[in-house]
Image (cartoon, grey):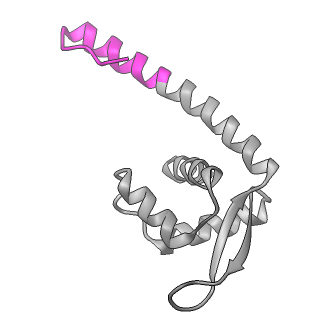
Amino acid sequence: MLKGIIEGCLLAIIKNKEVYGYELAEKLESYGFESFSEGTIYPLLMRMQKEELVTSRLKKSTAGPKRKYYSLTPRGELELKEFKNRWSGLQKNVNNVLQRELDAKGDETIEK
């Protein structure tokens, strides 16, 4: 399940601007995903490229070899929209379960 969530997060980050793999790892870390390295991200990016959700192109780097930058395809934008809808429904359902179970025990409430 987490893999699918990370893919959706990658699509959301890539939607905003063309980015390279290490930059994606840094962005995820800045959002609190500390356990994701480039070694985790690159296989996902390769699969996403194979599924035509993203495209890539090599660009000059100011330091070192060329970098592969990723951008969303129209299909990737559609997948991101569908991910957002699925995530919204999942979040609502999980919150409902947690809230009802906490209410049944008389515990404090969860913010909605």
Q: Residue at x 62, y 56 (%)?
A: 17
Instruction: Locate residue 81, reporting x and y percent.
Output: 69, 36
Check the image and report above or below for 48 versus 98.
Answer: below
Check the image and report above or below for 78 versus 97.
Answer: below
User: Is residue 110 within the magenta segment?
Assistant: yes
Q: Which residues are drawn in magenta?
A: 92-112
Instruction: Quadrant for the C terminus, please.
Output: top left
User: Is residue 50 within the magenta segment?
Assistant: no
Left or right side of 87 for 110:
left
The residue sitting at the bottom extreme is: 64
Dividing the picture into quadrants, the one containing residue 54 is bottom right
Q: Residue at x 56, y 52 (%)?
A: 13
Check the image and report above or below for 4 versus 92.
Answer: below
Magenta stretch: dominant secondary structure: helix
* Residue 60 visible in image: yes
Left or right side of 102 for 46:
right
